[in-house]
Image (cartoon, coloured by chain):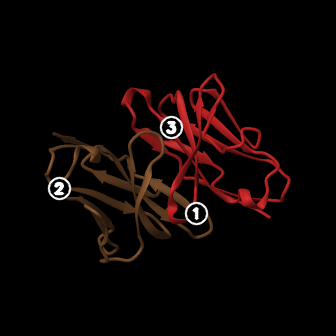
Amino acid sequence: EDKVVQSPLSLVVHEGDTVTLNCSYEVTNFRSLLWYKQEKKAPTFLFMLTSSGIEKKSGRLSSILDKKELFSILNITATQTGDSAIYLCASFTGGGADGLTFGKGTHLIIQP
Amino acid sequence: GAVVSQHPSRVICKSGTSVKIECRSLDFQATTMFWYRQFPKKSLMLMATSNEGSKATYEQGVEKDKFLINHASLTLSTLTVTSAHPEDSSFYICSARDGDRGWKLFFGSGTQLSVL
């Protein structure tokens, strides 16, 4: 059974802090790992990681994938209150039946 | 806990046929379920919000007669793509909200629809 585990489940920090969110996976036919930001109904796509060791950046957010150790991290520097959300990672698998397996998410709260 | 099962995982059909996708919450009651369509670059587009016992709320631009949603019980929502056409080919995902856990959403594994 494919599994994606995120940690921590919940995190409260102060504005300006840097946070690291973790995502480990055990899946068959792994193709890529995706990060989303969920504020209400529809998650917003952040990153798709396919290759190991290549950091992807978007503003204050960055992410990297380690395919040997089967995990990914999402970093957010100089956090702002608008970063408060649930961050989801998901593994995208192929091999005949494409599928997305989501982790349970990390609830990030940024306090002013 | 909090598992959402989506079925089928993959379906191939001829143009003009209808396809039903099921989304079940296995260990919690989901008063609200959401249906998404995934586009290239993996962005998820919210199609509709499915409320148990009432009509679904569709997002702007989504044809309600084309994408029929039924949420007849607290654990099951279905999306029926009626008279499917090749442009409906996509990856459809559902999520369910466990009302006891605030806005936390639990996702199904998706359905890859291919219309020939």
Q: Nearer the viewer, residue A79 or B67?
A: A79
Q: Nearer the viewer, residue A101 or A37?
A: A37
Q: Nearer the viewer, mark 2 or mark 1?
A: 2
Display colour for chain A: brown
Placement of the C terminus of chain A among the 4 image quadrants:
top left
Q: Quadrant of residue B75?
A: top right
Judge from the rendering whether residue B53 lies leftward or rightward of residue B30; answer left or right: right
Q: Residue at label 2?
A: A78
Q: Residues within 10 Å of mark 3 (few under 14, many from 20)?
A: many
Q: Residue at label 1?
A: A98
Display colour for chain B: red
- Label 3 with label 1: CB-CB less than 8 Å: no
Q: Quadrant of residue B51?
A: top right
Q: Which disc is residue A64 wearing?
A: none
Q: Which disc is residue B96 wearing?
A: 3
Same chain shared by disc 2 and disc 1:
yes
Q: Residue placed at 55% from the left, 59% from the top? A: A99
Judge from the rendering whether residue B53 lies leftward or rightward of residue B34; answer left or right: right
Q: Chain of mark 3?
A: B
Judge from the rendering whether residue B108 lies leftward or rightward of residue B87; answer left or right: left
Q: Amino acid at mark 3?
A: Ala
